[in-house]
Image (cartoon, helix red, strand yellow):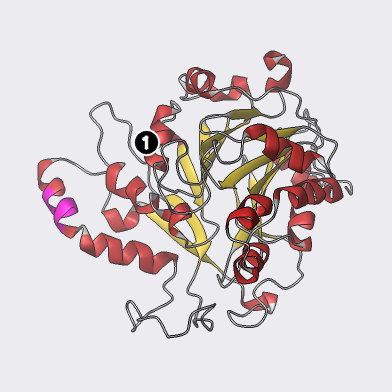
Amino acid sequence: MCEPSASRRALLGSAVALGAGLTAPVVGAATARAATRSEGEGAGDAEGTRLILLGTAGGPVPVAERFGMSSVLVVGDRNYLFDAGRGSVSQYVRAGLTLKSLRGIFVTHHHADHTADLFQYLLLGLISPDGDQLVPPVPVYGPGRAGELPPQWGKPRPAPLVNPANPTPGLKDLFADALNGWAYQFNELGREATMPAHPDRIMALHEIDVARTGADPLKVRAPRMRPFTVFEDDRIRVSATLVPHGLVFPAFGYRVETPDGVIAFSGDTAYDDNVVELAHDADVLVHEAVSVDYYADRDPSDGFIEHLKTAHTDVVNTGDVARRAGARKLVLSHLGPARPGMVPDRVWHEGAARRYAGPVVVGNDLDVVRLGRARGAAG
């Protein structure tokens, strides 16, 4: 990695090297809750930066063993959420995190397994008897409108359209339509209690502009590109890149620079050079993974397997991405199939390790991965 600029050094802090290794072990759910229960002003800073996997399931089908895709990056006394799949709000609270510490939300794409709980943070996070509520404005970044629907994949007849006047809604549409649908809840609540602000001012919504990338919803959904900055405060810098996820557009991966190191989130993606660059020299790469072998044994049709390869990354290839990127640790999440009994953790680990010699973590809900200063304390 090239020498960081002066502004980047200021962001990351002169006392911590950007390339610091991540050697702390991953801990289980009980430890995750204990480790984060002290969340509050200044408390998190002593623990350094840590990643908490709130949900690790791939796909929208609800399963008991894993919640929907969602991760939170705790940087000092601030929390940054990446995706909000089924159960994200409940898992956030189970992890001991406070809503008042939520300082940003980043959405990779508009599939339900990544967004089912997104609006629930607004719906459920405005009033609390102990004062733990969202502090506006909470910045939210994600995809805008796709603009056009692609041709159907593998179906003989056109599917009926939902909301034909706006069949490819973006982040702002999602919140506006949901807010209208829950108007009675907010209006009645506003007569019983004091809300921190009008609900449409709680979240600061930002649709990531991809016009200059040369991408389009039909032909080139993820052209070769460099990550570009979408958010920055005095703790982190977040960059995004487009990734190929079947017919979905836009779909993003994110790279986060923190005072304790760099973490990259692949989002849902096929094997792609954009992800390799996104994760270059990262301390942690959180990568989605599917087991093509598992599905091939049960549905060997060429069409379905080809779909998996154009929308997702086989677990063996996640190791290839991590190796090529020079990532120091690989964390597997968004696992498909999601039920542990279908593909045991050992098999996931062995698949990724075929092409990657570094540490591999098979993500389970409420696991914690620590970065930077916390690594010595964790042993």
Residue 247, x across and y down, in percent:
57, 73
* Closer to the camera in the image, 261 or 218: 218
Question: Where does label 1 land, which residue?
Answer: 90
Residue 138, x across and y down, in percent:
43, 49
- Determine whether 61 is above or below 309 in the image: above
* Closer to the camera in the image, 150 or 178: 150
Q: Quadrant of residue 367?
A: top right
Instruction: Judge left or right: residue 86 versus residue 143.
Output: left
Instruction: Judge left or right: residue 272 versus residue 231.
Output: right
- Determine whether 126 is above or below 306 in the image: above
Q: Is residue 70 visible?
A: yes
Which residues fall within the magenta stretch? 184-188
Residue drawn at 49 percent across, 49 percent down = 105
* Closer to the camera in the image, 100 or 359: 359
Residue 296, x across and y down, in percent:
64, 57
- Determine whether 98 is above or below 134 in the image: above
Taking the view exactly as shown, the residue that stands out farthest to the right is 2
Residue 71, x across and y down, in percent:
54, 41
Residue drawn at 58 percent across, 71 percent down = 209
Q: Amino acid at mark 1?
A: Ser
Residue drawn at 38 percent across, 49 percent down = 117
